[in-house]
Amino acid sequence: MQQNIAQIAIIGGGASGLAAAIEAKQYGGNDCHVIIIEKNARLGKKILATGNGRCNLGNIQEKQQSHYIGSCAELAAELLGKFEGSEAFFKSLGVICKADSGRLYPYSNHAASVLDALRFQVQELQIQVLTDSLANAITKESHYWKISLQNGEEILSEKVIVACGGKSAPAMGTDGNFYSVLKKMGHNITQIAPALCPVYTESSLLKGLKGIRTLAKVTLFKKTGEVVADDCGEVQFTDKALSGICVFNLAAFIVKNETYISLDLLPHLKKYEVDDLLWSLYSMRSNWSIADMLSGVFHKKMCPAIFESSGISDSMTAPVYSLTPDDMNNISETIKDWRFPIIGTAGWNNAQATSGGIHRSEITEDLESALCPGIYFSGEILDVTGECGGYNLAWAWCSGMCAARSAVDNLKGCDKND
Ligand SMILES: Cc1cc2nc3c(=O)[nH]c(=O)nc-3n(C[C@H](O)[C@H](O)[C@H](O)COP(=O)(O)OP(=O)(O)OC[C@H]3O[C@@H](n4cnc5c(N)ncnc54)[C@H](O)[C@@H]3O)c2cc1C
């Protein structure tokens, strides 16, 4: 049986694992033997799919806690506050970034620029890479941690960084296989759920809306009427789901079908202002057909669905003057509070992130396991989820680097306060 010995072994060669490996070698020095263990045939497969192939690698607001949720959100903001920032990190690797509405992308607009920078640096630093290597157990063996691979190989390492991601996008290697290993080691995983994904609703409500995009304030409610979370942006309708970044950002909060989403289609107007607008359109377009009454405000194909949800039973070809004051009020209410009951989320295959993971109470402020000293965590395996917009990758680079520094400090027997 082949056995490798390392100072620092990193399980997972994705975003945070690659950042961790580079930092471990650069900070730990040439003598620090670093190994990356990756189950896929190549490193960083998911990075190529990020940002629709452009890789939204960070955000100018990535240090603000308000963009993160989960028990580790506060710690994430603290660590991001000390982090040089995604843009500076990539500049140090020769990648120039540009900001687009606050989102950072490589200037090349090509995710491969980001992955190449990381993997060539890994090569340059002579970091050992084991691909096609699924880690499936970690046990203590004298002063080493022993990582067992599915292919029978074993790695002995003084420190281990668990950077294996969560459960979102399983086709890219992250299928949640490592949760059971961590549970065996005594860790608890908080309830996990797909985050940053479309939200399914009743398809009858979406009739005729497929492909339409509209600006809206999107609010997630409990059945009791309590607001859970909200966001503003472009909503996209599909035949089964509400989609778009503002909807993605709410998905992590959805708990067992107990909620509905409300769209405010004119969030900059108060209800009475929407009433005024409708009555002025009523006067101007009195002889037009109902179907065309709102065509100057919303996408023409969206209007019949708004009327249907307002309980307008008249034919769409009936004249606007046939609408009653009650009809007008119902239309106004729908525009301000168009409700879509939630059936579920689009699931792990369509999720860009995982909500839940290792709880804050089980790690130190240096990302070391509080239960198994010498084991560190980085990235999506931790209970922190960023909004759409580069926040999850920012956290991946930052936490990878923090975990690596902590592991190196620990190897050298340094107290971080020295
Ligand atoms: C389609 C898509 C688009 C996205 N776009 C963006 C974006 O533009 N901006 C943004 O900020 N975020 C984006 N994200 C989220 C972001 O990619 C992740 O949050 C980030 O990659 C998490 O980094 P990580 O290192 O924790 O995990 P990952 O990058 O998922 O890497 C984990 C690695 O561990 C490996 N692994 C898993 N289990 C084992 C095991 N047992 N043994 C060995 N290896 C293992 C996996 O194969 C994988 O390579 C996107 C996600 C998806 C799915």
Image: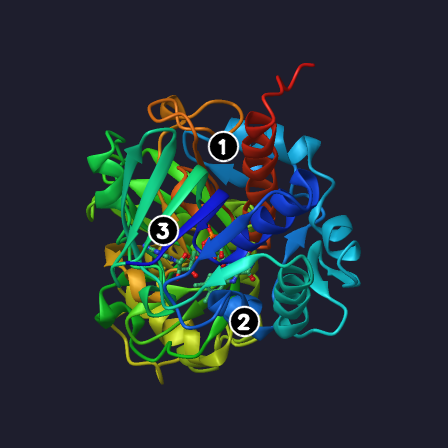
Residue holding disc 3: 166
Real-space CA distance between mark 1 and mark 2, rounded to the nearest whole angstrom = 26 Å
Residue plotted at (30% across, 71% down): 206
Residue 48 circle label:
2
Residue ranking furthest to the bottom: 317
1 vs 3, front mark: 3
Real-space CA distance between mark 2 and mark 3, rounded to the nearest whole angstrom = 17 Å
**Splitting the image into four quadrants, where does ligand 1 fall?**
bottom left
Dot 3 amino acid type? Gly
What secondary structure is found at the residue carrying circle 1? Answer: helix
Q: Nearer the viewer, residue 15 or 168?
A: 15
Residue holding disc 1: 73
Give the mark nearer the N terminus: 1 vs 3: 1
Give the mark nearer the N terminus: 1 vs 2: 2
Drawn side of residue 99 relative to residue 144, left or right: right
Q: Position of residue 234 (x, y in %)?
A: 53, 63
Residue 165 circle label:
none
Dot 2 amino acid type? Leu
Q: Which image quadrant is residue 357 in?
A: top left
